[in-house]
Amino acid sequence: LALGCDIPGFTKFDRKNYPYPDLMKGYQISQYDMPLAMEGHLDITADGQERRVRVERVHLEEDVSKLQHVNADNGKAHSLVDVNRSGVPLMEVVSHPDMRSPEEARSYLTSLHSIIQYLGVSTGNAQDGSFRCDANISLRPVGQEEYGTKAEIKNMNSVRAVFQALTHEMERQKKVLDSGERVVQETRGWSEERSVTYSQRSKEEAHDYRYFPEPDLPPLAVDGAWVEEIRSKIPELAGQRMARFCQQYGLPEYDARLLTNSKAMADFYEETAGLKTLTGAENEKYAKNVSNWVLGELSRLLNLQNLEIDQSPTSPAHIAELIDLVDQGTVSVSMAKTVLEEAFESGHSPAQVVDEKGYTQISDSSAVEAAVGEAIEANPNAVADYMGGKDTAAKFLVGQVMKITKGQAKPDLVNQLVVEALEALK
């Protein structure tokens, strides 16, 4: 429903028959001609352009085993079969061939992943196999309506891997066609270690699977009233939330899109933004400050620790408190980054870190003047450059003063006093 699909009033399951090591019993319970949902769409943005990707169908099936291909040191390559996920229910979303580049495929997967997270139907964790993708790719000459011969790529465990695999396969097929040869319809694997695709097996057509109705599962009649009840409960999705963030908080579309790609990040942002009751320009200024800290320094710290934002030791209240410390002149923006890093590591609030480490901004003119004098005395070459007309030398001396004061001096005051001291020497 979130993909705008039609929900037929009747659906059934089928047996898909094929011999392969990942299918122990020789058949897979799937859906063939009467899937759960059909003909939806997903709007994406790629390379600065908006496009609509049509969704052909959404069906349910059982998962198969996981094959792990091992290249042994003795040259005897082999495969291991992990049956832990075999038989687990799986939802498969099949798109029409509307994507024209690896970048569009990446945008499609990112948008689909976002919807899954917002709906709460899955963790969407690619690392544990909760979100996987098989990608079909073909090339055709410009102006040709008929699609080229496709290859299906498997074994990709992240959106990044899909992008890399499609980029490589696109170049591989281009070389094959440019040499006058034909692309073979086949299933190919993706090697993360070698960054190449490799042939696994020939690709079957639908009739090769010998589909027939699953005899052990009855068909399902889907009640229309039940469908409408579920439709009414669909939560606000990423695109809608992005538009609201732009309107409610005055955020640039770029910020709003990044914040709402992840439901957890959007929730964190909104909780932080809601801690103050402001209006007009003040509200927009605070909202943009929150966005800058969440998308910037906080995201950097989370990435370094390989943490998701809902695992952050720094809370929304901590971010709001940090912004207050900067606005009140207690710490400078550069010092606030140090405060956030130490608060993140310790779990303490920014105010606690400032008190414990004595990070309060120095705004006393006499103390800053002493540091300015020290910087000028220690850097005669910079002073000479300034006297010779190089204004950038003043910026160097400002940096030296900030280093002497360990970043605690008020930047505006430092700028003022450095220029005054240099001008006095003329």
Image (cartoon, grey):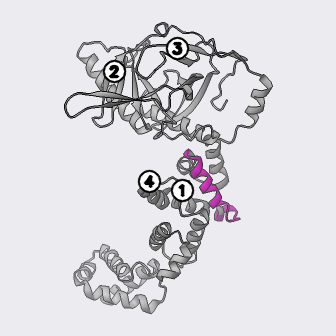
Badge 1 element: helix
Examine the image and state in which quarter residue 204 appears. top left
User: Which residues fall within the magenta stretch?
Assistant: 261-282
What secondary structure characterizes most of the magenta part? helix
* Sequence-earlier tag: 3 or 4: 3
Disc ID at residue 345: none
The image shows residue 366, relative to residue 86, as above or below, that is: below
Counting residues from the start of the chain, the first of labels 2 and 3 encountered is 3
* Percent of width and height locating residue 28: 52, 18
Q: Would you say the residues marked 3 and 4 are in contact, meaning their CB atoms lie under 8 Å apart?
A: no
* Crowd tier of the residue under label 2, counting other residues whose Cα lies within 10 Å: few below 14, some 14–19, many 20 or above: some
Name the residue beneath numbered marker 4: 306
Q: Quadrant of residue 300?
A: bottom left
On screen, residue 393 above or below 272: below
Q: Residue at x 68, y 61 (%)?
A: 280
- Give the structural element (helix, strand or loop) at label 2: strand
- The amino acid at mark 2 is Gln
State the residue position of label 1: 311
Task: Tell me how far mark 2 sits from mark 1, CA to CA.
Answer: 39 Å
The mark found on residue 16 in the picture is 3
* Badge 3 element: strand
Q: Which residue bears the numbered disc 2?
A: 200
3D distance between C-alphas at marks 2 and 3: 20 Å
Q: Quadrant of the C terminus?
A: bottom left
Amino acid tagged 1: Gln
